Amino acid sequence: QVQLVESGGGLVQAGGSLRLSCAASGRTFSSYVMGWFRQAPGKEREFVASISWSGAGTYYSDSVKGRFTISRDNAKNTVYLQMNSLKPEDTAVYYCAAQGRASSVPDYWGQGTQVTVSS
């Protein structure tokens, strides 16, 4: 069982930056692929970014590529999402997710943190 707790959301002006954190419980954090997803009002949840177990591999949606950076610290059981050059369309609830090696979809989800970008 893995519990995920996100933090770092808030209100920011367009062009600003935020860093989200996701703290994970459990001793097997390094065995999970970690990802960030988001859901805007009235829209489906969408993939934002993911990072491999070692941190060597990162993947981004086209909408955030070049602006967002995902990273992880396995010693602290934490994954981060640095968000720069934020746009109003980035407004959403951001969710952290953990996916085991044998899974094709995330196994665990955090409760979400709200990010609001004003124009």
Image: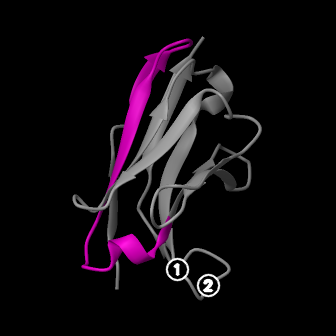
For badge 2, the amino acid type reads Ser
Q: Position of residue 3 (x, y in %)?
A: 32, 73
Quadrant, the N terminus? bottom left
The reply to whether residue 57 is in sight is yes
For badge 1, the amino acid type reads Asp
Q: Residue at x 41, y 27 (%)?
A: 18
The reply to whether residue 9 is in sight is no
Q: Position of residue 77 (x, y in %)?
A: 28, 62
Magenta stretch contains residue 5: no
Q: Residue at x 65, y 28 (%)?
A: 66
Q: Secondary structure at mark 1?
A: loop
Q: Secondary structure at mark 2?
A: loop
Image vertical order of residue 71 relative to residue 106, above or below: above
Q: Residue at x 57, y 74 (%)?
A: 106
Circle 1 sits on which residue? 107
Q: Position of residue 47 (x, y in %)?
A: 67, 54
- Label 2 – label 1 distance at C-alpha: 7 Å
The reply to whether the C-beta atoms of the residues labelled 2 and 1 are less than 8 Å apart is: yes
53 or 35: nearer the viewer: 53
Circle 2 sits on which residue? 103
Q: Residue at x 59, y 88 (%)?
A: 102
Magenta range is 9-33
Q: How is the image coloured?
A: one colour
83 or 119: nearer the viewer: 83
